[in-house]
Image (cartoon, helix red, strand yellow):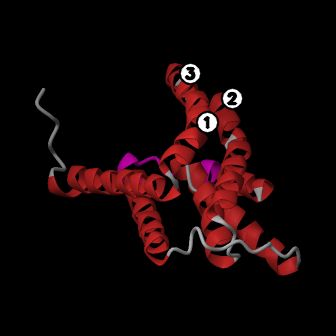
Amino acid sequence: VTIWGWGGSVLTMLALRISEAIVLRIIFAVFSFLLLCYVVYGLKKGTLKSQDKPVQRNWKTMIVFAITGFLGGMMLGWISVGIDTFIFFVLTAVYKVDSRKATVTSILVIGWTSLVPLLFHMFYFQDVPYLLWLMVSGGSIIGARVGPLLNKLVGRKIMMILFVIMLAGEVIRTFIELVVLPNFKGPI
């Protein structure tokens, strides 16, 4: 999956590069909305927690994951996320893997797949905001330690509801900024 993700992200960074920020924000908002719908559906049906089938290793599965990796890598190249969600969706919706296992798998995949776009932006495009990257890294390290504990403390369903609220907030904010108030620059 990761190798195909690298291919998809390199394709979007070099050949299918989108430089218009508004287009990228719309892609991200649509992506967030679709993910929101899937998670709400899973919460409503209870399917994200009541399943756990092993993934069969065969050619069909390999092809599905290659396509998933490539498409997710393309999203990663455009909006810096995507391959993790594509993997999570395929694992939970198609292969009926438990959502906890799918989450861990998708986090590992995005971690390794993000390495190639980071190196491209660092050495080829030379546009990595190092101070922002350092600032976010600390939160990521702390979040990786606190997240599982918080998940255990409040439960998976509450965490998924909080995730839905976060996604809904992002979709609403983008809609307001791009559709309702497109020329609003703020109070200053």
- Which residue in the structure is indicated by mark 3? 134
Element type at marker 2?
helix
Q: Earlier in the sequence, mark 2 or mark 3?
A: 2
**Percent position of residue 185, x then y:** 17, 37
Mark 3 and mark 1 in contact? Answer it, CB < 8 Å.
no
In the depicted structure, whether residue 142 falls above or below residue 79: above
Q: 175 and 128: which one is in front?
A: 175
Gap between marks 1 and 2 measured at Cα:
27 Å
Q: Can you give x and y, in whole percent of width and height, for residue 62 in the image?
A: 83, 72
Which residues, given as a range, are shown in magenta?
12-23
**Residue at coordinates 80% horizontally, 72% vertically from top-left?**
54
Image quadrant in which the C terminus is located: top left
The disc placed on residue 123 is 2
Q: Name the residue under label 1.
A: 144
The type of residue carrying mark 2 is Phe
Q: Distance between the residues labelled 2 and 3?
A: 17 Å
Asked whether the residues under the numbered discs 2 and 3 touch, taking CB atoms below 8 Å apart as contact, a structural biologist would say: no
Question: Helix or strand or loop: what does disc 3 sit on?
Answer: helix
124 up-or-down from 19: above or below: above
